[in-house]
Image (cartoon, rainbow, N blue to C red):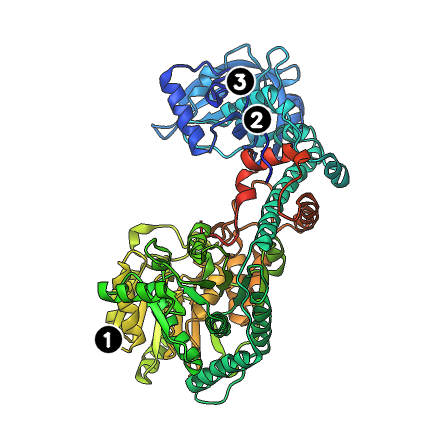
Amino acid sequence: MVKGPARKVPPTDPVELLSIGLGQSGLTAAATLRRAGVRLGIYHVRDLLFHLPRRYDDLRQMQRLGDLAWVGEGTVASARVRVVDIHVEPTFRRRVQRTVATLADETGTAQATWFGRRYIERRLAAGDTVVVSGKVRRFGRRLTFDNPEFQRTEGDAEVLHAGRIVPVYPLTAGLTAARLRTAIREALDRAGSSYPEYLPGPILRDERLMPIARALEEAHYPSTFEARDAALCRLAFDELLALQVGMVGRRRQRVRAAAPRIEVSSEDDRAIRAAVVDSLAARAGRPVRLTADQVAAIDIVREDVRRGTPMLRLLQGDVGSGKTAVAAYALAAAARAGRQGALLAPTDLLARQHLVTVAALLEGVGLPVTLLTGSLSAEGRKRALESIRSGQASVVVGTHALIQEAVEFADLGLVVVDEQHRFGVEQRSQLEAKAGGQAPHVLLMTATPIPRTLGQVLYADLDVSDLRTPPEGRVPIRTGIRAPDDLEGTWQRVRDEAAAGHRTFVVVPLIEEAAGGDSGAAGDEGASAVAAESEARRLADLLAPLRVGLVHGRMKAADRDAEMARFRDGGLDVLVGTTVVEVGVDVPEATMMVVEGADRFGLAQLHQLRGRVGRGRAESFCVLVSDTTDEVAQARLKAVAELRDGFALAEKDFELRREGDVLGLAQSGLPRLRVASIQDPDHQALAARARRHAEALLDEAGRLDPQDEALARELDEGWLRDVARADPRSAA
């Protein structure tokens, strides 16, 4: 994007603003406030301006004290009063004191009570005139404001904390709500009112958006809720426009890059497809055909790689939907054209699994597969590096070891990234850079489908192919929900499956009892958090003589992979683990998945875990264990039990989590949007319009016009910088 001259941030230290009007000074106070600011990400005055409220309290209803006798218990009211008396008195709990103020106006009296806030006695004094806002309680005939907000009314000072629509901000230790409101008010007066407009005039007019300076004012101290909504709409649009400008820009830059033309002749095309189908049939023990979705994906990949611009395609589909077969075709196409293809996997164990699978798929066309991982011996690594450097290794499978400086490709033409969300943009770029002067074609794979509406926003800069049709013979997985005290039948089924030569996964949300918290999904606070280590010990006793293993994220990778390999090879009957098994080995003999504390996992995560079983020919089962009473959590578990299609589940997750983190959105590479909500239907429409404007703003090279230098500056160095640079495929 075009960069204009740097705009100076208003020369005001935010610590100075945080200290304004509070009678606090000195190095200790400044250091405390600076630490608080850093924790909130406040380094400049601009950061204060865009530290937006998390909610608003409507404290506008001004009353006379005499009229409060008629309002309902717990009603929030505001009043302009005089402080008659203020004192601190003990409570029945010795360490807790309460501050009590007697208030009066011309119509009556009331009390205000604050618990544990000794500083209030220093802020208020008899004779002060204040505006007070809070819930009204009755104790006999006495009216009391319970822990109210208040502000002295002195001269022409604006009332910030009571008697108006009051912003409620995210806070941190060392910073009070009153101090932050006062600081933001000062920042608005000093810099917000003159904040330079950066949106082009035509966009402001077309979208009927308020100017940025007014939007900042109304977002912090709204005159009405309608004005607040208009302000937040303006800020939400700006975020979505920044996101779309970044993605459209990257897409156009990619289209202009040079990529190797990989021509797949009709003869090679037939041979590769036949080799893939024959391998799948040999594994299944019966004739098979590629699904319609696989055929369509292969057709479009063949078309993509023959162009002179780099392919960037996302292949999304459930576990077992046949993504690896499509990837194998792409790798073979590159190899038969004299180029090299590389498949990047997130773990050593998964790379070795891909080695076996891809080698079998390509055996029919005589293409060997080379492995490069960190666990190779020194001699094995040396041979692999030389084979890759010379070009003898036409198909390479590996882990992060592929992106190390010592790795040199003779002619890298295509890169496949498995579980793409586990790799950052920089890691993928390092591998792509090994293609020399040209950009390689890139095929990204994920087993976590993204809801259609979300994908329109997150994946605007790449092409997407869906594998929705399960391969023939895929065994349906019976899914049920059980309470923790109703598992006797489940454990008996585990014993029966082991007797038949089958295996069981048991997944728990935590590693050890002291870890606390949950795995990140929304669930009720009382849900049981079962630790992997203690559960492995318990099940070893309960299920004896079955062999029980344990894997979790704190184990050394080599130890974890060895334990998973034991499970795969039949050395274990039951594998207890955390979600590290979500992306793991292919174990056709695994027929049971038991997920304890299931309400603590995301819906898509549960579907991923369920996909670890049902990969052979035997009937398979998934048991979701939960005692949650939370209605949304229950609805999510019910959805997993009833729906088999990962795409349908993704849409259901999107529907159920309108206010939450959708499909691990926080880990998708998309920054936390401050205002825009992709779950909000209105903002979805806003995102579509932002996309159209982004398409019009950027030239064919993905650059902004020099006349839009104000927007370029804001995207490069302003509050929208992180959004504009976000890549939704990053694991950052």
In the displayed structure, 695 sits above or below 328; it is: above
Crowd class of label 3 (few under 14; some 14 to 19; many from 20; radius 10 Å): some
Secondary structure of the residue carrying numbered label 3: strand
Crowd class of label 1 (few under 14; some 14 to 19; many from 20; radius 10 Å): few
| Residue in the foreground of this view, choosing between 269 and 136 | 269
Q: What residue type is labelled 3?
A: Thr
- Quote the CA–CA distance across marks 2 and 1: 70 Å
Q: Residue 544 carries which label?
A: 1
Q: Are marks 2 and 1 in contact (CB under 8 Å)?
A: no
- Quote the CA–CA distance across marks 1 and 3: 70 Å
x and y percent of residue 688 in the render?
68, 51
In the displayed structure, 529 sits above or below 621; it is: above
x and y percent of residue 211 in the render?
70, 31
In the displayed structure, 686 sits above or below 292; it is: above
| Residue in the foreground of this view, choosing between 361 and 173 | 361
Residue pointed to by mark 2: 7
Q: Quadrant of residue 512?
A: bottom left
Residue drawn at x 26%, y 58% is: 556
Q: Which mark is residue 102?
A: 3
- Quarter containing the N terminus: top right
In the displayed structure, 600 sits above or below 56; it is: below
Secondary structure of the residue carrying numbered label 1: loop
Q: In which quarter of the image is residue 88?
A: top left
- Quote the CA–CA distance across marks 2 and 3: 51 Å
Q: Are marks 1 and 3 in contact (CB under 8 Å)?
A: no
Q: Earlier in the sequence, mark 2 or mark 3?
A: 2
Which residue is farthest bottom? 286
Crowd class of label 2 (few under 14; some 14 to 19; many from 20; radius 10 Å): few
